[in-house]
Amino acid sequence: MTMPSLRTVELPAVLCNSVEQRFSARFGSLESFLTFVLQELVRDDSRLMDDAERRLVEERLKDLGYM
């Protein structure tokens, strides 16, 4: 099995530190957290989210500095 190619993304250190502190118990690393979030955003069935769910997700991502 081949490893997928990776890309480098630059983010503010303070934001990364906050995410690591808040989500490290669940995700283990910043990379795992970001992979999860981005996969959720591009899932095919994400179109099925109702408007309220979409607004909630977008609001949370804005609060975290990702949007």
Image (cartoon, rainbow, N blue to C red):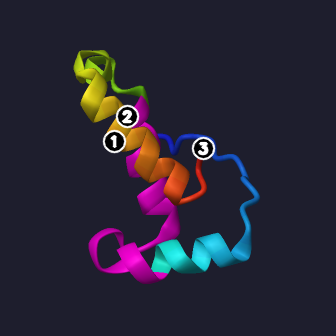
Image mark for residue 55? 2
Q: Which of 22 and 6 is in front in this view?
A: 22
Amino acid found under the numbered disc labelled 3: Met
Pointer 2 with pointer 1, Cβ within 8 A: yes
- Which SS class for mark 2? helix
> Under tag 1, what secondary structure?
helix
Is label 1 in contact with label 3 (beta carbons under 8 Å)?
no
x and y, in percent, of residue 20 in the image: 48, 77
Residue 43: quadrant of the picture: top left
Q: Earlier in the sequence, mark 1 or mark 3?
A: 1
Span shown in magenta: 21-41
Residue type of the residue flagged with mark 1: Leu
Disc 2 vs disc 3: which is toward the camera?
Answer: 2
> Along the line of sight, which residue is nearer the eye, 7 or 15?
15
Residue type, mark 2 in image: Arg
Image quarter of the C terminus: top right
Q: Residue 67 carries which label?
A: 3
Between residue 1 and residue 38, name the one nearer to us.
38
For the point 48% across and 49% down, the residue is 61
Which residue does the numbered mark 1 point to in the structure image? 56
SS state under label 3: loop
Q: In which quarter of the image is the N terminus?
A: top left
